[in-house]
Image (cartoon, helix red, strand yellow):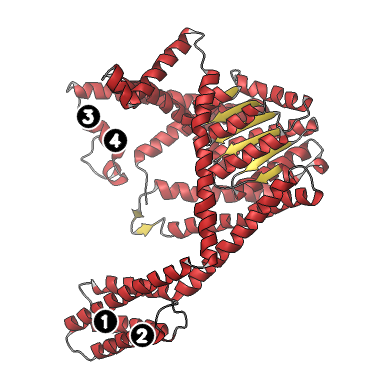
């Protein structure tokens, strides 16, 4: 079983501390600025365009398992479902695994209920396809072509099937907005989709759309955490450079990062 | 009540995994994560309850289309039909394998256990007797078992098992522990070989049945080739998407095009042969010093965002996305 070292705990405090601090500050009323993200702004346009053409909207989370990333995608799904239910259109959500299916169903029901249109909710909007990656892509292609979707949202984690999904929407002329943390798939989405959210922008989408103080404060805290990483990288570069020139022992830093609880807190030989 | 209970249980669950990772393996003789593996397995059991949801959803969505004879009913018919056929064929194959091989599976477990135990240096007379007793009981079950691979001679099978049993019984009378262990190992090895031969015969018999033919047709004849066909579409889509999207209209696009050319030509032998032998080195430089840092930057930001969201979920700081308020 893997266990952490004290350095990991210190890093977690350094990363999570600012997030919690700014969440509490946001809850007390402080307003934080979020820069414009074009892809998120265009979500409303995409839905509006699909509704005008009388075509449904599709929302896919790819191969995302039940994880914080799926939770972030559910926030966007909730927003998209609110908009489409208000405009009396349909969202088709192909699901890859049964646990996600249950979460999608609950999220969409909640969105319909919030808009006062729970009676209009059709459980068949959420469709289980397959847990197999390529069977899922094949099913999504079939749905896109048969239903002639007008807007396609691809948010989550994707693997090789990303281009198949994006090209399916391209072939029917759907307006596509994608967002993924899978770096290798970003180029495919950039070429095939109208707008692409990269990495953290996907997590920021929910905060951007809902303007929830907790999420906005968290965004600010994440920026500070990234600043901490930058400082640590620069510190590492300086220390390694100094050790390369023989000014300091390189083992000192390595020992701090890899020591166990015993050696760091209970041994008198380890320098701090 | 739910507003307090759900966040409380979420916090306790998250706290356990956080402490299990953070704390050392042992603190003063106490192991915090002693039941960690069992707990992790139990979480998998909970998610296994969701297995039926997919089947129910498939049946509901496509059954409704079929009943109403809506658009796409032919597709739904073939989907439900192939699902049913696959389910029946694979279920029967599984049942056949489990029933026919069931007793041999327990024999294999016993063979492995005996071999493992016999290697222990401090093995005494009581332990050897225990191994002999277990093996004898298993041989007794195999001798009276009705599940024989077809084509294996019944009397030959039973007499071979009987011979192994009598050798084991004679072994018990031997006084020398070392000789008894050696004989025990011989019996176990012969049983392992016999099991392997019987299973090979059983497998040959199984492959000639209609069910196994259908299983091979469905899995190897349809499922795998269809998946590979979908995968092969990627090659065409990549070329099509690149042709559609990449236009050299600006300086950045031109730089990207040159970099793409260098990477592609550096990957193939023809680039080295006909253009320059430095191309692979250039390609490596581009990938290691330009591309990788960009990917890492994306990973950092995604990881921090994921960590922050996980902490918010753990502490229930977020507004519930399922909430209608």
Label 3 – label 1 distance at C-alpha: 56 Å
Residue B256: x %, y % from top left: 44, 15
Is label 3 or label 1 in front? 1
Label 2 – label 1 distance at C-alpha: 29 Å
Relative depth, front residue between A89 and B194: B194
CA neighbours of label 4 inside 10 A, class few (<14), some (14 to 19), many (20+): some
Quadrant assignment for the C terminus of chain B: top right
Q: Element type at marker 4?
A: helix
Relative depth, front residue between B256 and B147: B147
**Position above or below: B54 against A29:** below
Residue A24 visible (yes or no)? no
Within the image, what quadrant is residue B190 found in? Answer: bottom left
Query: Which residue is at a point 28% across and 70% down the rendered structure image?
Result: B116
Is label 2 or label 1 in front? 2
Residue A87: x %, y % from top left: 80, 30
Q: Chain of mark 4?
A: A
- Of labels 2 and 1, earlier in sequence is 1
In the rendered image, which residue does mark 1 sit on? B128
């Amino acid at each position: 079983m893997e266990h952490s070292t004290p350095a990991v705990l210190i890093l977690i405090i350094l990363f999570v501390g600012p997030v919690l601090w700014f969440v509490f500050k946001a809850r007390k009323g402080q307003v934080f600025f979020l820069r414009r993200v074009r892809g998120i702004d265009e979500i409303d346009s995409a839905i509006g365009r699909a509704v005008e053409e009388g075509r449904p909207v599709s929302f896919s989370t790819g191969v995302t398992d039940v994880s914080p990333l799926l939770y972030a995608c559910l926030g966007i799904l909730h927003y998209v479902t609110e908009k489409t239910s208000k405009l009396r259109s349909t969202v088709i959500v192909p699901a890859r695994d049964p646990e996600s299916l249950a979460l999608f169903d609950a999220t969409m029901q909640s969105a319909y209920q919030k808009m006062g249109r729970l009676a209009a909710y059709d459980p068949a909007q959420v469709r289980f396809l397959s847990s197999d990656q390529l069977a899922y892509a094949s099913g999504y292609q079939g749905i896109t072509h048969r239903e002639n979707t007008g807007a396609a949202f691809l948010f989550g984690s994707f693997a090789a099937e990303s281009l198949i999904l994006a090209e399916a929407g391209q072939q029917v002329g759907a307006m596509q907005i994608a967002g993924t943390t899978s770096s290798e798939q970003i180029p495919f989405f950039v070429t095939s989709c109208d707008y692409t959210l990269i990495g953290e922008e996907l997590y920021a989408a929910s905060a951007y759309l809902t303007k929830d103080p907790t999420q906005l404060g968290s965004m600010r805290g994440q920026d500070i955490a990234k600043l901490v990483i930058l400082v640590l990288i620069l510190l590492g570069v300086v220390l390694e450079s100094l050790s390369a020139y023989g000014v300091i022992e390189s083992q000192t830093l390595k020992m701090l990062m890899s020591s166990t609880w015993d050696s760091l807190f209970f041994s008198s030989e380890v320098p701090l | 009540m739910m507003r307090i209970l759900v966040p409380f249980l979420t916090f306790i669950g998250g706290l356990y995994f956080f402490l299990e990772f953070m704390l050392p393996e042992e603190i003063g003789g106490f192991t915090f994560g002693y039941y960690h593996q069992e707990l992790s397995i139990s979480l998998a059991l909970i998610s296994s309850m969701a297995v039926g949801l997919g089947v129910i959803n498939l049946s509901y969505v496509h059954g409704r289309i079929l009943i109403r004879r809506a658009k796409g009913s032919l597709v739904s018919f073939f989907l439900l039909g192939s699902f049913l056929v696959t389910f029946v064929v694979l279920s029967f194959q599984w049942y056949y394998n489990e029933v026919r091989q069931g007793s041999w599976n327990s024999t294999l477990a016993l063979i492995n256990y005996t071999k493992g135990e016999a290697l222990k240096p401090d093995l005494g007379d009581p332990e050897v007797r225990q191994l002999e007793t277990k093996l004898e009981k298993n041989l007794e079950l195999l001798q009276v078992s009705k599940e024989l691979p077809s084509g294996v001679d019944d009397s030959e099978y039973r007499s071979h098992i009987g011979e192994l049993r009598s050798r084991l019984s004679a072994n018990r009378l031997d006084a020398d522990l070392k000789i008894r262990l050696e004989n025990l190992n011989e019996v176990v090895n012969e049983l392992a070989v016999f099991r392997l031969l019987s299973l090979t015969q059983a497998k040959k018999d199984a492959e000639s049945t209609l069910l196994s033919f259908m299983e091979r047709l469905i899995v190897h004849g349809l499922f795998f080739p269809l998946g590979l066909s979908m995968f092969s579409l990627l090659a065409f889509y990549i070329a099509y998407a690149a042709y559609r999207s990449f236009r050299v209209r600006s300086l950045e696009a031109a730089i990207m095009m040159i970099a793409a050319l260098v990477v592609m030509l550096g990957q193939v032998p023809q680039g080295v042969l006909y253009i320059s032998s430095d191309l692979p080195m250039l390609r490596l430089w581009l990938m290691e010093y330009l591309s990788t840092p960009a990917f890492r930057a994306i990973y950092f930001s995604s990881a921090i965002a994921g960590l922050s969201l996980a902490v918010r979920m753990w502490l229930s700081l977020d507004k519930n996305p399922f909430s209608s308020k």
